[in-house]
Image (cartoon, coloured by chain):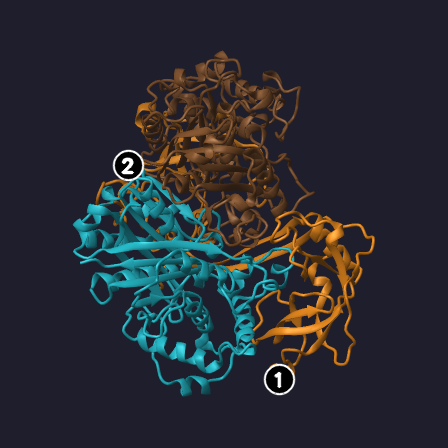
Chain colours: A brown, B orange, C cyan
């Protein structure tokens, strides 16, 4: 049995900031939802079901917050689902929402992912001390820095590649009115001059902590036909593996490689480098751009940094990556994955504004979470899938 | 001996909540001993005011807000014989739904009475305001019985600047238990030994042992005492201070692959300047004095270089 | 729609689990049981989905190590909901409906006893005006029970009848943590605890885990002669506010009932953690008097958080497999005072 066609016809996001003290959690979500619905030319009353995603409940100190938010999100009297798959959650939430349409169960699904990180402290929420254990890690940066070191050693990449990526994404963010970090003076040199936090990761090579939300309206074929520019879903994939396992490849995890292979097969893509026009890849630390470029098959193993270094991932490059500014410029954790998925949709809809890649026809949205162990990806296109 | 090691853990944080424009009016009202309600499109006056209308879904504005009396009627109640921490009273009390005069839907709060015999549905009550008010729901200390009070009605909203946020302490107490396999590991550490277990399916030696080998889902079983010497596979130099940090930066956190293990453990590297730590460096465990040992990985104070030549990259590259 | 059936079910329920809050060691034997029932290995499973709560475990990402119990080399197609097992099953059923996979194993776990459960659940409430008062689960249920008593919709005797039947039926359920019926009179003679509730009106704090296997079409028929086919699956949510809701009703349950076909249902497994909630659900579902309610003893005798709703589906399916019933409905709830409700109608076909 084939999946029913589904398309994104509405994308909305908040202005992402370190602290959105002007809004409640409901207000934050509604800011994204109302923009997505306006974009889709629909209202909450048109929506059949709502799928909410966010990262750990400890961030906001509310257990299953979708329950108290239900009425404000327009979910009362409707089916409501809550997805939580760690950092990949924004992506997996979009995939669950798509599957409601692809299964033929619903015609118009609203999905929203958010994080209001300013309600607590992410570093605290992610590393509540456990008895008997030893707190050696220092947050997510401390977790990922050793694996970045491994990548540099394995690939012999020059140490300034991370700074090239960071400077590029921060410059791209200036073209995105919703981005959190907006610093026109960021250059490769300024990134290299920033403090070394978790050697080999510098301050400017890390993502910020943001308040923000993203919402998508995903609809069936008939509804999509009424849209001037639907982003058709050509493939979706989720893969998981363990945080730690004997001899697990933590630089280029098997779950990531498997997910990419399955995704390209679904989307009928044989050479992503030439067939994908824009990619929104989850890069919370700059070095993950070359790492994921390899894992996703845009470059051979050990060669990803060459794409980043050469400018191929810049907006005018062969494979523009994170034209929105990416996670490095805005990181409301639970929403970050959906922002990647939504930005990919904006590109193929020709609706990305100043950070639009001319003529983008197929785009990748990518998210990962946990200790590089949960992966969610999709490919969207300006034309309906042919298969 | 219990099957598992257990220890209490408290998860506590003072959450800083921004409340949005509508609850901001409600909380500002409480600070002024005033109850602000919302008029929803179905014609009801609701307290606390919902931020979004349940029917039209639009955000309520000041024009939709009214003030209601601080007297009202109990519409339902329940007795709380054994209060839990941080409830309005630490002695038995009632929770009640109270429809305030001028409102159409009840508000949930505590009702201060001595016994369940002193509550009936329909009884008249009034707000007992807290002496010190900060713009939070706890500005209402509770409701208290108040017979023979006249009714009130909704009145227009007074001009008052909205509050923007509240602070909500959340503190939860848990009894944490290590898994049986982890418990064996921590008990070993209490004896100065590093114990792993071998997976009967794939033969890999896990440290700590696992309730399920992540490769195949089989619990690890056969105990393997590991060497106290190993190889740094990869590491990072921590320069950043963070909440709860026990060691002053800069320090090195490293994956140490103990000889005989198939998975690295994470630990500290000391006894060498941070900038001289290398991938492949051979290190050994340095234990705390025995009298300080507990059931914890912290019994090993850190790892330090053995002085032996570095391990060849090929011997550990499949552990990265 | 594809024909999808429940073909495997395993559960563990206990007052206090002597193990880690990740419950990995509890999940391993459950999966083994599922493989034994189906004759499959993990490689036969197309999709995995779990349900759990970080706040129950007291730590972020508490579900992450649960995938170890699967054995994830090669990596798996997997998802997680911060919801009860029944909603994990819903996500898996959707995944099968897309045609992407033919089989799924869903599981859930929770160690309620690690904290003070009725207090922990206060974090599930509206965080600005409710949680700061720490209204506990029992109190919220008490407000609801009183509302129905005051309105003359049910009384303490009707509640005791529910409890007595549940405790009696639980005697035959090896997993039930509270059991032993007596008589309605004896139960009514027991002291009131959280007026108007007696202790037997409230489900016991329960640790546990459960797993359910789903399969489509021929994959289901290869496992069982009489699979429990999912004839209808629907869920809805109501607003949370205790003030604007009619507490004597559960509109989302009625809505789910209208979305499925309950005609001819012989058995109903209702997820009612408080005795009066069963009375609300029976009314909202419009169940006839001859429908057998909660033959397992129900959640009133054993309510492991995050799996108790799904366990209702497993219990109903077991009775389809055995031929005890031809059509059954299972119900799951979530949130305070029956805020969110799911119905799953199962049918045996000969």
Q: Nearer the viewer, mark 2 or mark 1?
A: 1
Q: Which SS class for mark 2?
A: loop
Q: Could you tell me if residue B195 is visible in this image?
A: no
Q: Which mark is residue B117?
A: 1
**Could you tell me which secondary element the residue under label 1 belongs to?**
helix
Screen quadrant of the C terminus of chain B? top left
Percent across and percent down for residue B138 are 70, 62
Determine the residue positioned at 63% across, 78% down: B121
Residue C50 location, x and y as percent?
37, 49
Whole-angstrom CA distance, mark 2 to mark 1, is 63 Å
Specify whether residue A126 is in view.
yes
Which is more toward the observer, C335 or B56? B56
Question: Is B108 rendered above or below residue A13?
Answer: below
Front-most of residues B159 and A158: B159
Pinpoint the chain carrying mark 2: C
- Residue A269, located in which quarter of the rendered image? top left
Placement of the N terminus of chain B among the 4 image quadrants: bottom left
Q: Is A149 situated above or below B170?
A: above
* Mark 2 surroundings: few (<14), some (14-19) or many (≥20) residues within 10 A: some
Name the quadrant containing residue C272: bottom left
Taking the image as shown, residue C38 lies to the left or right of residue C125, namely left
Which residue is at the front of the view, A133 or C110?
C110
Q: Is residue C87 above or below residue A185?
A: below
**Residue picked out by circle 2:** C74
Other residues around mark 1 within 10 Å, as few (<14) / some (14–19) / many (≥20) = few
Query: Vertically, is B151 above or below A170?
Result: below
Q: Residue at x 46, y 13 (%)?
A: A318
């Amino acid at each position: 049995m084939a999946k029913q066609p589904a398309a994104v016809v509405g994308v909305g996001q908040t202005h992402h900031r370190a602290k959105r003290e002007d809004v409640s959690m409901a207000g934050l979500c509604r800011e994204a939802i109302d923009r997505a619905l306006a974009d889709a030319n629909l209202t909450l009353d048109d929506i059949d079901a709502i799928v909410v995603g966010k990262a750990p409940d400890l961030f906001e100190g509310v257990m299953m917050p979708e329950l108290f938010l239900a009425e404000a999100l327009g979910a009362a009297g409707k089916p409501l689902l809550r997805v939580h798959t760690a950092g990949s959650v924004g992506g997996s939430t979009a995939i669950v929402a798509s599957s409601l349409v692809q299964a033929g169960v619903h015609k118009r699904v609203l999905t929203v992912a958010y994080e209001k990180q300013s309600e607590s402290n992410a570093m605290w929420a992610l590393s509540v001390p456990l008895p008997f254990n030893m707190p050696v890690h220092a947050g997510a940066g401390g977790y990922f820095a050793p694996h970045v070191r491994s990548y540099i050693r394995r690939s012999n990449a020059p140490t300034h590649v991370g700074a090239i990526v960071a400077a590029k994404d921060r410059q791209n963010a200036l073209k995105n009115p919703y981005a959190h970090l907006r610093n026109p003076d960021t250059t490769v040199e300024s990134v290299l001059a920033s403090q070394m936090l978790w050697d080999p990761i510098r301050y400017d090579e890390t993502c910020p902590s943001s308040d923000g939300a993203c919402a998508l309206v995903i609809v069936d074929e008939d509804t999509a036909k009424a849209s001037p520019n639907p982003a058709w879903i050509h493939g979706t994939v989720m893969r998981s593996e363990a945080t730690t396992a004997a001899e697990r490849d933590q630089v280029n995890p098997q779950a990531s490689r498997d997910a990419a292979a399955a995704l390209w097969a679904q989307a009928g893509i044989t050479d992503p480098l030439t067939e994908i026009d824009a990619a929104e890849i989850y890069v919370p630390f700059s070095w993950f751009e070359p790492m994921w470029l390899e894992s996703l098959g845009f470059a051979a193993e050990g060669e990803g940094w060459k794409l980043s270094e050469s400018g191929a991932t810049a907006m005018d490059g062969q494979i523009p990556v994170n034209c929105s500014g990416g996670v490095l410029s805005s990181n409301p954790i639970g929403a970050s994955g959906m922002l990647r998925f939504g930005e990919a949709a904006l590109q193929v809809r020709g609706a990305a504004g100043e950070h639009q890649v001319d003529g983008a026809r197929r785009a990748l949205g990518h998210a990962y979470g946990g200790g590089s162990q949960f992966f969610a990806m999709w490919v969207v296109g300006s034309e309906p899938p042919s298969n | 001996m219990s099957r598992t090691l257990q220890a209490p853990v408290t998860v506590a944080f003072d959450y800083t909540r921004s409340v949005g424009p509508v609850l901001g009016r409600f909380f500002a009202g409480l600070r002024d001993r005033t109850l602000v309600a919302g008029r929803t499109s179905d014609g009801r006056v609701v307290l606390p005011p919902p931020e979004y209308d349940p029917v039209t879904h639009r955000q309520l504005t000041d024009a939709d807000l009214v003030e209601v009396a601080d007297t009202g009627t109990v519409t339902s109640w329940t007795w709380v014989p054994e209060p839990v921490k941080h409830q309005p009273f630490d002695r038995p009390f009632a929770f009640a739904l109270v429809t305030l005069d001028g409102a159409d839907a009840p508000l949930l709060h505590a009702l201060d009475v001595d016994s369940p015999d002193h509550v009936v549905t329909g009884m008249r009550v009034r707000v007992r305001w807290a002496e010190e008010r900060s713009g939070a729901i706890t500005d209402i200390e509770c409701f208290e019985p108040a017979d023979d009070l006249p009714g009130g009605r909704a009145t227009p909203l007074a001009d008052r600047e909205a509050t923007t946020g509240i602070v909500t302490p959340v503190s939860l107490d848990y009894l944490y238990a290590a898994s049986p396999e982890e418990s064996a590991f921590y008990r070993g550490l209490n004896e100065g030994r590093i114990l792993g277990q071998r997976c009967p399916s794939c033969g890999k030696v896990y440290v700590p042992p696992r309730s399920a080998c992540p490769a195949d889902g089989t619990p690890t079983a056969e105990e393997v005492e590991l060497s106290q010497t190993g190889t740094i596979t990869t590491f990072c130099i921590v320069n950043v201070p963070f909440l709860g940090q026990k060691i002053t930066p800069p320090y090195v956190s490293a994956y140490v692959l103990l000889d005989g293990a198939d998975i690295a453990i994470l630990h500290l590297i000391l006894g060498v300047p941070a900038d001289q730590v290398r991938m492949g460096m051979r290190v050994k465990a340095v234990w705390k004095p025995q009298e300080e040992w507990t059931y914890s990985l912290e019994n090993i104070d850190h790892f330090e270089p053995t002085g032996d030549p570095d391990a060849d990259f090929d011997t550990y590259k499949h552990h990265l | 729609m594809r024909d999808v059936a429940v073909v495997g079910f395993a559960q563990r329920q206990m007052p206090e689990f002597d193990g880690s809050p990740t419950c990995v060691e509890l999940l391993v034997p459950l999966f083994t049981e599922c493989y034994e029932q189906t004759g499959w290995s993990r490689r036969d499973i197309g999709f995995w989905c779990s349900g759990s709560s970080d706040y129950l475990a007291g730590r972020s990402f508490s579900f992450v190590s649960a995938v170890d119990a699967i054995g994830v080399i090669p990596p798996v197609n997997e998802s997680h909901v911060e919801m009860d097992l029944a909603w994990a099953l819903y996500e898996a059923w959707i995944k099968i409906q897309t045609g992407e996979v033919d089989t799924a194993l869903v599981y859930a776990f929770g160690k309620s006893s690690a904290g003070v459960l009725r207090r922990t659940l206060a974090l599930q409430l509206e965080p600005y005006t409710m949680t700061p008062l720490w209204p506990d689960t029992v109190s919220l249920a008490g407000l609801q029970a009183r509302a129905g008593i005051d309105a003359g919709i049910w009384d303490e005797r009707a509640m005791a009848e529910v409890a007595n039947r549940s405790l009696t039926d639980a005697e035959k359920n090896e997993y039930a943590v509270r059991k032993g019926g007596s008589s309605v009179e004896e139960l009514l003679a027991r002291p009131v605890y959280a007026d108007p509730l007696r202790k037997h009106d409230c489900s016991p704090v329960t640790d546990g885990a459960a797993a359910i296997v789903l399969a489509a079409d021929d994959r289901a028929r290869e496992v069982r002669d009489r699979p429990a086919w999912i004839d209808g699956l629907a869920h809805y949510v109501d607003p949370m506010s205790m003030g604007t809701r009619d507490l004597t009703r559960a509109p989302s349950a009625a809505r789910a009932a209208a979305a499925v076909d309950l005609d001819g249902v012989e058995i109903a497994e209702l997820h009612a953690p408080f005795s009066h909630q069963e009375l609300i659900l029976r009314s909202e579902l419009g169940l006839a008097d001859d429908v057998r309610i909660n033959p397992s003893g129900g959640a009133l005798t054993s309510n492991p958080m995050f799996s108790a709703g799904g366990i209702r589906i497993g219990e109903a399916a077991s009775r389809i497999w055995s031929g005890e019933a031809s059509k059954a409905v299972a119900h799951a709830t979530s949130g305070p005072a029956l805020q969110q409700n799911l119905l799953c109608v199962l049918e045996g076909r000969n």
